[in-house]
Amino acid sequence: EIVLTQSPGTLSLSPGERATLSCRASQSVGTRYLAWYQQKPGQAPRLLIYGASSRATGFPDRFSGSGSGTDFTLTISRLEPEDFAVYYCQQYDSSLITFGQGTRLEIK
Amino acid sequence: EVQLLESGGGLVQPGGSLRLSCAASGFIFSNFAMTWVRQVPGKGLEWVSGLTPGGDSTYYANSVKGRFTISRDNSKNTLYLQMNSLRAEDTALYYCAKDFIRGGSGYYFDYWGLGTLVTVSS
């Protein structure tokens, strides 16, 4: 089973700042099989990035994903108030899926 | 509009059973893999189980293998999760979710229900 480790656990930033979230895998993950989700309190997760770098419908271009192999990054170029949430990475490998433990992005 | 509505959660004693359902609408259900993901309130996401569009292939997390069974009825647009031998650590909010890719194997999921809460306690 591939273990995903996200860092930092909590990221405290101000609106307008740049956020960089990391997701590291215990084994290589195909870029096609790496996704990011955004979850706000009381809501279900929402697909944000798929295929490591493709943005899902409804998310602005300030969100971007990158990476390959074992290291993946979610970048939010300029934080808006609505971006403060928990972000999870997720991978698919050999019909098994695992999630990272999440990064909480909070307002400083 | 895609909608997923879970039901069947509740309070059950350790060792007991529950059957969760997920009623789908707004898309061609039989064309998409489906999955169950759970979340302990305030904690992270844990994938539980998934199955292919036709239901012929099923997959399970090690933590539930041999105790849970995923299935679907494409004529009723409904996904199921039969949960047996429940443990306290199975307590969570259970979400069903739809595969992003038509005809895919369930790589990632673009629509989620609101979840149904399962509590395992004596």
Image (cartoon, rainbow, N blue to C red):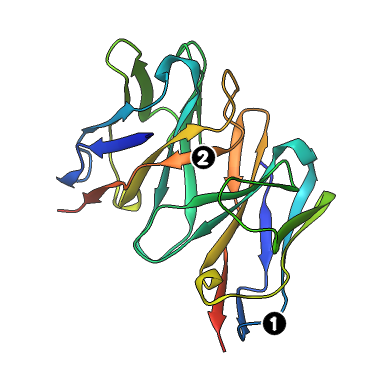
Question: Circle 1 marks a residue in which chain?
Answer: A
Pointer 1 residue: A17
Is residue B114 shown above or below B82? below
Q: Residue at x 48, y 28 (%)?
A: B50
Q: Nearer the viewer, residue B3 or A27?
A: B3
Question: Circle 2 marks a residue in which chain?
Answer: B
Q: Secondary structure at mark 2?
A: strand
Left or right of A56 on screen, residue B60: left
Q: Position of residue B42 (x, y in %)?
A: 39, 66
Left or right of B117 on screen, residue B13: left
Q: Residue at x 38, y 24 (%)?
A: B70
Q: Position of residue B81 (x, y in %)?
A: 32, 29
Q: Position of residue A53 (x, y in %)?
A: 75, 48
Q: Amino acid at mark 2?
A: Asp
Q: Position of residue A3 (x, y in %)?
A: 67, 50
Q: Nearer the viewer, residue A57 or B59?
A: A57
The quadrant of the image that shows the N terminus of chain B is top left
Q: Nearer the viewer, residue A90 or B99?
A: B99
Q: Are marks 1 and 2 in contact (CB under 8 Å)?
A: no
Q: Residue at x 22, y 45 (%)?
A: B14
Q: Secondary structure at mark 1?
A: loop
Mark 2 neighbour class, 10 Å CA radius: few under 14, some 14 to 19, many 20 or more: some
Quick check: do tags 1 and 2 share a chain?
no
Left or right of B112 on screen, residue A83: right
Left or right of B5 on screen, residue B103: right
Is residue A108 shown above or below A66? below
| Count of numbered marks | 2
Q: Amino acid at mark 1?
A: Glu
Pointer 2 residue: B110
